[in-house]
Amino acid sequence: MSSGDRGRRSPDSEPAGCEPTGADRPRPPVSRRRLFAWSASSAAGIILLTAFDPARANEESRAGQRAVDSVTRPAGSRSGGAVRGPAGEAPSATIGTAAVPAPAAPAAPAAPAYRIHEVRPDAPASAIALTIDDGPHPVWTPRILEVLRANQVAATFSVVGAQAAANPGLVRRIVAEGHTLCNHTMTHPQPFSRRTPDQIRVEMTHAQSAIVDAGVEPPRLFRAPGGDWSPAVLAAASGLGMTSLGWDVDPRDWARPGTESIRQSLGGARPGDILLCHDGGGNRAQTVAALQQVLPALRARGLSFVPL
Ligand SMILES: [Zn+2]
């Protein structure tokens, strides 16, 4: 079974939004030094991207091949994990209303990374990656962190900037416990690809600032809400020095299909797959219960969880 048979191109693969929460009050403003460092590295990245790494280009070419069926979808279709619009199209504001000049952007990939080794070439062949989106949430994130700790699993949390601002202690705890972070926009707007290039970039930069303000390093990964990719979204992430991150296995846990359904979907994962779960956007008790069952089972199959 190819990865395309699974969840990454299923429609409406993410909830319409996140539940904002008010717990875990933000700390007083912290030093902006990390943000400056991130901004400087992003600027350097824009320059350096003109000298393109051939190995990376090859990876992106392969990723583009896998995205062929996605990019030919009708422009108006809802498609989680798919790229909307023609591949390689220059970033512009043609979707929507008046033409707004898009800033000059470096060459961007034609699709997000759908496989672990596109992001972590150093990962073992047995690698599998768990991504957890839409938090941090004051109830569900700690419960998921406990399950991960009990199973010695390191994951990647795609955090929403507004949630990070409301729960900065959880952002720090996620990192302190060995997990990594991915930028998942400031407000999780959908359909994301329909935003103007300026709105897309602001969603990314505000989330990055909120995460840095929580007291951790800025993420180098970006995931579009609902997996709603477009050339403009991919270019904006690339321009900010972030790698766009897709997924392979989507149990649609946000829709609460039942613990057994989530467990079965995740249990079908294969080496190299990126799994999608959620710690925000609603009651995640089924997700917690499914992870409690499936993480030991996947590890028993010899799969090694790696943070991205
Ligand atoms: Zn999301």
Image: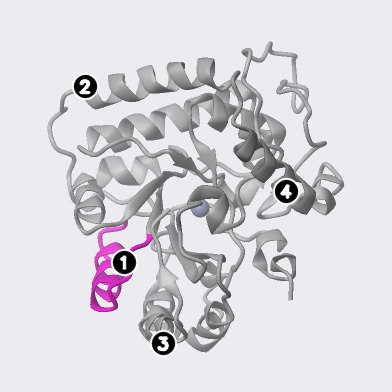
Is 149 colored magenta in this rendering?
yes
Picture layout, residue 38 above or below residue 217: above
Sequence-wise, the earlier of marks 1 and 4 is 4
Picture layout, residue 7 above or below residue 247: below
Crowd rating for badge 2 (residues with CA inside 10 Å; few <14, some 14–19, many 20+): few
Q: Which residue is mark 4?
A: 62
Picture layout, residue 206 above or below residue 70: above
Question: Which disc, if any, is residue 33?
Answer: 2
* Residue plotted at (52% across, 88% down): 260
* Residue 153 relative to residue 108: left or right: left
Q: Amino acid at mark 2?
A: Arg
The segment highlighted magenta reads: 137-155
Mark 3 CB lies closer than 8 A to ligand 1: no
Dot 4: what SS? helix
Q: Nearer the viewer, residue 271 or 74?
A: 271
Residues at marks 2 and 4, CA–CA distance in whole angstroms: 37 Å
